[in-house]
Image (cartoon, grey):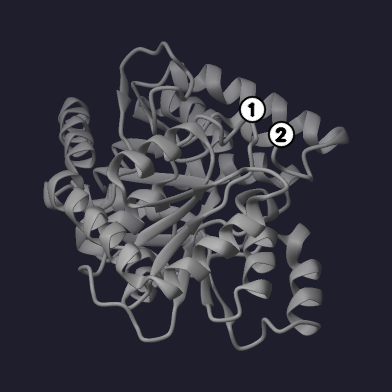
Amino acid sequence: MPDLSIVTSGHDVADARLHRVVAACRRVDLTVEVLGLGDPSSAPDGVSVHTRARGSVARRSRMAFDVARAARGRVLFALDPDSTLSCLAIGRLRRRLVVADVHEDYLSLLRDRRWAAGPVGLLASTVARFATWAAARADLTVVADEHVPPKRARQRMVVRNLPDLTMLPDPSPRDQTPRALYVGDVRASRGLLHMLDVLEEAVDWHLDIVGPVAASDQHEVQRRMGGSGLAGRVRFHGRMPPERAWTFARGAWCGLVMLEDTPAFREAMPSKLFEYLACGLGVLVTDLPRQRDLVEGLGAGRVVDNGPDAVSQAVEQLQRWVERPAELDVCRANAAAWAAENATSSDYDALAQALVKLVSERG
């Protein structure tokens, strides 16, 4: 019987937070099984892996109960709203302890999803509300940031999305050709179409995009890539596990975080921003409060308006870095200096110790 079963009906086993949790568990010799979606070869090393095909939003709840029933661990660790509900139910029936890992404010996030309308949207918001209720009743509630609900729980622990340096390359010199990087969820609200608009005009630049393109944006991406000057300069690499995804940081000039001003993102601190800094990249971000304060405070990049002028300002800044690379090098040096002092997996190590305690309670 494994010590810990990480259960999800919504996350691919390549998910970066999942990989960071597993890495911390392995450092304290916990045995782990992962039950999720996608290609088993993208799962963390050293774990037992069981994957299923991704289903529709409406089928996720059924899948979540199937996966929770199949989990063999002494402690069940739920990674998404559906799995939080199913793990709490199964855990109480089988007398297993339950951890709910809440990545984001799920209700706010639904406002960013085009599919979250009509009956499907009503179902999703209902699940999110019940999942937040269930997360507060788990034996340990882990949240990715202070603002993420539930604010009250039996035992609440903040585990920030700080990078695990073992999964990232060391800072490296810039390639000769200017190249930007984006790693993460790829959709319009996270800046996908703005990034393509920027690259249309910033003709000296190349861009690597690593992550799954949202189904709702795939047609538009194909249209733009087929009828523009982006082909050959913008490369889509799809979903990859963290160690492979971040190899594209070697030689890159900067990282892009062009989030729209949505309720889900306004108070968020994207994990990719920390990872760009840890790789020694300058960053170009839209004007959202927390990421603006971090970037400007460190002098590690530039902030562009989050509105009609975002694209033109981004193009202007990228061109400025081509003409004055010494300015970018200062940003990159400041990013590397921040990483040397602050990039740490201590939050995940603290989580691993809490999981050791839970496992010992189960005996």
Residue 346: which quarter of the image?
top left
Q: Is residue 52 visible?
A: no
Residue kind at label 1, given as amino acid type: Leu
**Residue at the image point whose x is 35% and y is 58% from the top:** 276
Q: Are marks 1 and 2 in contact (CB under 8 Å)?
A: yes
Q: Is residue 70 above or below residue 92?
A: below
Write down the residue under mark 1: 107
Of residue 316 and residue 160, the one placed in the foreground of this image is 316
Specify few, some or many for label 1: CA neighbours under 10 Å numbering under 14, 14-19, or 20 or more. Answer: some
**Residue at the image point whose x is 72% and y is 43% from the top:** 113
Left or right of residue 346: residue 187: right
**In the visual, does 286 lie left or right of 24?**
right
Could you say where residue 148 lies in the image, as x and y percent from the top left? 47, 25
Q: Residues within 10 Å of mark 2 (few under 14, many from 20)?
A: some
Q: Nearer the viewer, residue 213 or 337?
A: 337
Disc 2 target residue? 111
Work out whether 189 lies above or below 267.
below
Q: Which mark is residue 1?
A: none
Q: Which element type, helix, strand or loop, lies under badge 1?
A: helix
Q: Nearer the viewer, residue 62 or 227?
A: 227
Q: Secondary structure at mark 2?
A: loop
Which residue is located at x 54 percent, y 40 percent? 287
User: Quadrant of the rendered structure where residue 136 is?
Assistant: top left
Residue flagged by tag 2: what amino acid is it?
Answer: Arg
Q: Can I make out residue 196 in this image? A: yes
Please indicate whether residue 233 sits to the left or right of residue 91 in the image.
Answer: right
Residue drawn at x 51%, y 20% is 134
